């Protein structure tokens, strides 16, 4: 029984998981196998949901579903590896569909099925491997398209109710589930790797316990206003079933919609989006107290720099990674600890990545507050773009 983060694609004829280079504790599965100027049309508004205590009932959820489901699509692809499926949603009346990159990766043919019964051939307009996003174009009449409005993922609160609509296991189309925002600012491995096949980091990931299964990849995660606040991407698995399908452990991950909104203007032009680049590595997990002590650091929060990429922005700014062996194997002292960026406290590596990805572009400057040799310093860094 394997634990990990799984991309949620359903494989139609080949029973198994798509292998990608991701974080060792997370398996991504998004496909279910066998088994220009863009006008956004906003659905009828519901009373604003503040994220506080509400008297939610079945009519609220039913209203969200009736308004949003017409804009959620099933995506079926044929590739050299076989057939698979995922989910997506309508972005505008020009025929742009948003989904995950891993849903359409390697596709030779794409079919997009709408809840109305309409079926159309889709073509890939552009992709973003760093955040696992793809834009598909379909040629259908505008009056057949029901765009879903995009929300503000920065406004989300942990504990806020959310719903997911998608196409689990390729056959259960238009499935709606409900849960909460379990955490914000998570990080996952990017699908894109450097020349040494090391994965870049995908940041500003939303964690949710809304049930997400194979085939849900690319579908919307929504707030109770019916606005998309995330694109469902992966789940944490605790093992597999007898047929090899990953087991949902109640930990799902979605790409934040604010990341998507930054990327979309470039993708809609069919171009590549350049992410800001710092040029450091850090642990995706919190250090223990024993590890902080071994590093000789008295503060027990922040982003500890394990390595600095030679000639990268961090290196040029004078930041340091760890080089001095400690009594803990593979833990090296001497690195800088980033505790704030532009005056915003940094508790973890994910905080730094989320802030930079959602607020900055290549060429922008950031001011880092660091601790070096137990002394606080300020460092100005000019962001590059990912190589």
Image (tube, rainbow, N blue to C red):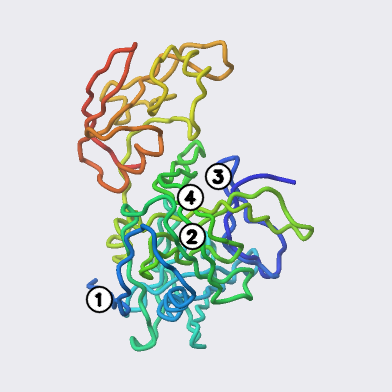
Name which of mark 1 and mark 3 comes first in the sequence. Answer: 3
Name which of mark 4 and mark 3 comes first in the sequence. Answer: 3
The residue that label 3 is drawn on is: 22
Q: Sort mark 3 into few (<14), some (14-19) or many (20+) by Cα contacts within 10 Å.
A: many
Q: Is residue 75 left or right of residue 19?
A: left
Foreground of the two, 171 or 164:
164
Q: CA distance from mark 1 to mark 3?
A: 36 Å
Q: Nearer the viewer, mark 2 or mark 1?
A: 2
Query: Residue 232 has which mark?
Result: 2
Q: CA distance from mark 2 to mark 1?
A: 24 Å
Q: CA distance from mark 4 to mark 1?
A: 33 Å
Name which of mark 4 and mark 2 comes first in the sequence. Answer: 4
The residue that label 1 is drawn on is: 39
Q: Sort mark 4 into few (<14), some (14-19) or many (20+) by Cα contacts within 10 Å.
A: some
* Element on which disc 3 rests: loop
Q: CA distance from mark 4 to mark 2?
A: 14 Å
Q: CA distance from mark 2 to mark 3?
A: 16 Å
Would you identify the image quadrant in which residue 21 lies? top right
* Element on which disc 4 rests: strand
State the residue at coordinates (48%, 83%). Answer: 120
Give x and y (percent) for residue 119.
Answer: 50, 85
Give x and y (percent) for residue 73.
Answer: 48, 76
Name which of mark 2 and mark 1 comes first in the sequence. Answer: 1
Proximity of marks 4 and 2: CB atoms separated by less than 8 Å: no
Foreground of the two, 196 or 14:
14
The residue that label 4 is drawn on is: 182
């Amino acid at each position: 029984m394997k634990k990990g983060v799984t991309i949620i694609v359903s494989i139609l004829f080949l029973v198994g998981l798509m292998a990608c280079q991701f974080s060792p504790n997370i398996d991504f599965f998004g496909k279910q196998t066998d088994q220009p100027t863009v006008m956004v049309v906003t659905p009828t508004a519901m009373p604003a949901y503040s994220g506080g205590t509400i008297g939610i009932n079945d009519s609220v959820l039913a209203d969200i579903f009736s308004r949003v489901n017409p804009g959620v699509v099933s995506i079926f692809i044929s590739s050299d590896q076989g057939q698979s499926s995922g989910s997506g949603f309508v972005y505008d009346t020009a025929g742009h569909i948003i989904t995950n990159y891993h849903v359409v990766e390697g596709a030779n043919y794409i079919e997009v099925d709408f809840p109305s019964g309409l079926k159309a051939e889709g073509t890939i307009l552009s992709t973003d491997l760093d955040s696992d996003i793809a834009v598909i174009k379909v040629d259908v009449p505008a009056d057949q398209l029901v765009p879903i409005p995009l929300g503000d993922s920065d406004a989300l609160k942990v504990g806020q109710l959310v719903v997911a609509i998608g196409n689990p296991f390729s056959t259960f189309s238009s499935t709606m589930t409900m849960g909460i925002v379990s955490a914000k600012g998570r990080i996952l491995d990017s699908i894109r790797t450097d020349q040494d096949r090391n994965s870049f980091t995908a940041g500003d990931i939303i964690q949710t316990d809304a049930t997400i299964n194979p085939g849900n990849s690319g579908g919307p995660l929504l707030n109770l206003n019916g606005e998309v606040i995330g694109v469902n991407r992966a789940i944490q698995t605790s093992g597999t079933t007898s047929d090899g399908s990953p087991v949902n452990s109640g930990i799902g991950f979605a790409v934040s919609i604010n990341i998507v909104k930054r990327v979309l203007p470039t993708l809609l032009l069919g171009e590549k989006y350049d992410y800001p680049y710092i040029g450091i590595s850090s642990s995706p997990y919190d250090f223990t107290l024993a590890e902080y002590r071994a590093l000789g650091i008295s503060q027990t929060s922040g982003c500890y720099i394990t390595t600095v990429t030679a000639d990268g922005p961090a290196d040029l700014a004078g930041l340091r990674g760890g080089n001095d062996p400690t009594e803990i194997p593979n833990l090296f002292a001497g690195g800088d600890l980033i505790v704030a960026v532009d005056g915003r406290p940094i508790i973890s590596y994910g905080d730094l990545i989320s802030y930079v990805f959602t607020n900055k572009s290549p060429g922008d400057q950031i001011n880092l507050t660091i601790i070096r040799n137990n002394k606080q310093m300020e460092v100005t860094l000019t962001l590059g773009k990912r190589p």
